[in-house]
């Protein structure tokens, strides 16, 4: 009986040590959400192109934990925009390096940047794309995450239908979920 109790206590103690160690390991990492608001004054508008730059490096979480970032878990956005055309317009978003050459034509963007959002269909008038919807539209997620890991990038929007300034971006919020720790 004594040996049986000792075996049970031994198993329970081992299990308890494993659970405590696993719990402590969870304290060594953390996940945070960084939201960057892009206002109307931060959005550059050209004939067929709009763009804005995103800088995560000034955010507290980023600056405090930059060297300890383990993963960019997700990246999405909220966007307030308006289709100024008389008909439905399809838009696309591209990503390029921060402070890179300013691309002002659709051809330059399609050649030098990476498409990261596809099939954005906007009816005439104001529209809002929420974060969950943006996650269904994002493409080339690996590329998006690599730009986010650098902390800075430029986002371009184009209207492939070549309707001048058909999509007017009023404002946007870029939302990045990041895991960091030891």
Image (cartoon, grey):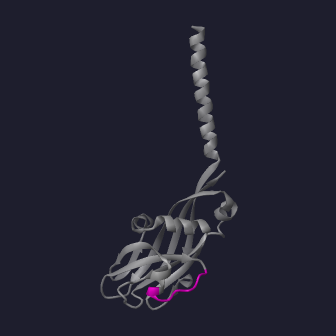
Please indicate, yes or no, whether residue 175 appears anywhere in the rendered image.
yes
In the image, is residue 151 above or below residue 182? below
Magenta residue check for 106: yes
Magenta stretch prevailing secondary structure: loop
Q: Is residue 158 left or right of residue 100?
A: left
Please indicate, yes or no, whether residue 35 appears anywhere in the rendered image.
no
Which residue reaches farthest top? Answer: 1
| Residue 104 in picture, x, y percent from top left | 50, 89
| Residue 57 in picture, x, y percent from top left | 65, 69
Pick the residue in front: 150 or 124.
Answer: 150
Picture quadrant where residue 64 is located: bottom right
Q: How many marks?
A: 0
Picture quadrant where residue 127 is located: bottom left
Quadrant for the N terminus, please.
top right
In the image, the segment drawn in magenta is 99-107
Q: Is residue 181 left or right of residue 51?
A: right
| Residue 121 in picture, x, y percent from top left | 34, 76
Which residue reaches farthest front? Answer: 111
Residue at 60% of width from left, 45% of height from top?
Answer: 26
In the image, is residue 64 above or below residue 182? below
Pick the residue in front: 78 or 158.
Answer: 158
Residue at 41% of width from left, 71% of height from top?
Answer: 129
Pick the residue in front: 94 or 128.
Answer: 94
Which residue reaches farthest left? Answer: 87
Picture quadrant where residue 133 is located: bottom left
Residue at 45% of width from left, 92% of height from top?
Answer: 47
In the image, is residue 100 above or below residue 71? below
| Residue 131 in picture, x, y percent from top left | 45, 66
Residue at 52% of width from left, 70% of height from top?
Answer: 174
């Amino acid at each position: 009986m004594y040996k049986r109790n000792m075996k049970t206590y031994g198993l329970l103690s081992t299990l308890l040590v494993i659970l405590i160690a696993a719990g402590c390991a969870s304290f060594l990492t953390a996940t945070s959400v960084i939201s960057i608001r892009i206002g109307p004054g931060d959005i550059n508008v050209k004939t067929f192109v709009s763009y804005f730059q995103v800088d995560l490096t000034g955010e507290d979480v980023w600056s405090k934990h930059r060297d300890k970032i383990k993963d960019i878990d997700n990246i999405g956005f909220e966007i307030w925009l308006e289709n100024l055309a008389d008909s439905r317009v399809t838009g696309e978003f591209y990503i390029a390096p921060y402070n890179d050459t300013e691309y002002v034509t659709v051809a330059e963007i399609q050649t030098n940047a990476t498409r990261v959002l596809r099939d954005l269909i906007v009816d005439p008038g104001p529209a809002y794309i929420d974060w969950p919807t943006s996650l269904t539209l994002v493409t080339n997620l690996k590329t998006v995450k690599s730009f986010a890991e650098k902390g800075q990038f430029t986002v371009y929007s184009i209207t492939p239908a070549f309707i001048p300034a058909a999509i007017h971006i009023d404002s946007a919020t870029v939302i990045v979920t990041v895991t960091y720790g030891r």
